[in-house]
Each structure stands twice: as structure tokens, then as C-alpha cells.
Amino acid sequence: MKDYSDLLYTIDEAFDYIVKSFSDFSKTEGDRLLSDVFQAFPQIASAHEQLSHLVQGNQTMLKAIADISAVADQAELLIQNFDDLPVRQEIISKKLYPAFAHWHKNIQQELNPYIQS
């Protein structure tokens, strides 16, 4: 669970960098990081299968895991509009990253008791 939590923090930091790269042109790794974030999503899905088995009966954690669907919806919207740079930047900064950050905060609250012991 600690590795999973660390992965989520890394993704959050990557999103923060990506959004900053839209206005700070010295940050040149935004596109590569976005690719890395999308490559991490299948790892998250795989971890969710394992987590779901570990926390059976913990309905709050299971709901937090399922709530990733809001992030997936925004990722799908991004994919559909990927070729339009201004729209892509707006989706990332105003929809995808906020959805991820909100979900990450919620699931982290559920993870903390498991990883702080």
C-alpha cells in the first residue's frame, strides 16, 4: 500500500509540473510527464484489484477506489481533444488534474491508517 501511495504522490507532482509548464516555458518535460502519467494509470487499475481484495468489507475504501471513475472520465475527455493544444491544456488544468487531486486526497485519507502503522 505504501508503494501505491507513493505512486499517487508522484502522479500528483507530475500533474503540478505539467500545469506549471503551460506558463513556465523553462519547464520542458511536461509532455513526457503527461505520457508517464498515462502509463501509470494501468498500474493504478492493477493496484485497485489487489487493494479491493485486501480491504474487503471496508466500504469507505472500496468507494474511494471506485471513485477513480471521475478521473477516468476526464482522461477520456483529454484523449478525445488531445490534438487541440489550448483545449488539452484547459482540460488538464481545469478538469483532469483537479479531479485527480480530489480523488487522491480522498483515497489517501483511507490509505493512511494502513501505511502509518
Image: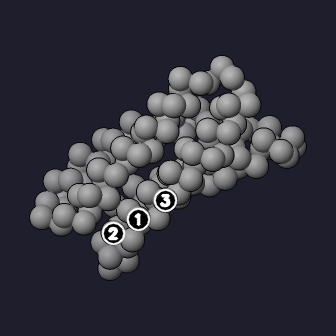
Which residue sits at x=67%, y=53%?
16
The residue to which callout 1 is attached is: 106
Q: Amino acid at mark 3?
A: His
- Residue depicted at 41% across the width and 46% down the height: 70
Q: Earlier in the sequence, mark 2 or mark 3?
A: 3
| Residue 21, visible in the rendered structure | yes
- Contact (CB < 8 A) between labels 2 and 3? no
Q: Tags 1 and 2 in contact by the CB under 8 Å rule?
A: yes
Residue mark closest to the camera, 1 vs 2: 1
Question: Mark 2 to mark 3: distance in Å?
Answer: 13 Å
Secondary element at tag 2: helix
Compared across the picture, whether 24 is left or right of 58 comes to right
Q: Are marks 1 and 3 in contact (CB under 8 Å)?
A: yes
Q: Position of residue 2 (x, y in %)?
A: 39, 63
Q: What crowding class fits label 1: few (fewer than 14 Cα within 10 Å), some (14-19), or many (20 or more)?
A: some
At horizontal 74% and vertical 31% (from top left) the residue drawn is 86
* Name of the residue lying farthest toward the bottom: 117
Residue drawn at x 43%, y 37% is: 73
Q: Amino acid at mark 2?
A: Glu
Q: Kindly state the secondary structure of the residue where label 1 is placed.
A: helix
Residue 94 position within the rendered picture, expressed as x and y whole percent measured from the top left: 63, 47
Residue 102, disc: 3
Find disc 2 in the rendering and name its residue: 110
Residue 10 shows in the view: no
Q: CA distance from mark 1 to mark 2?
A: 7 Å
Q: Is residue 83 above or below residue 56?
A: above
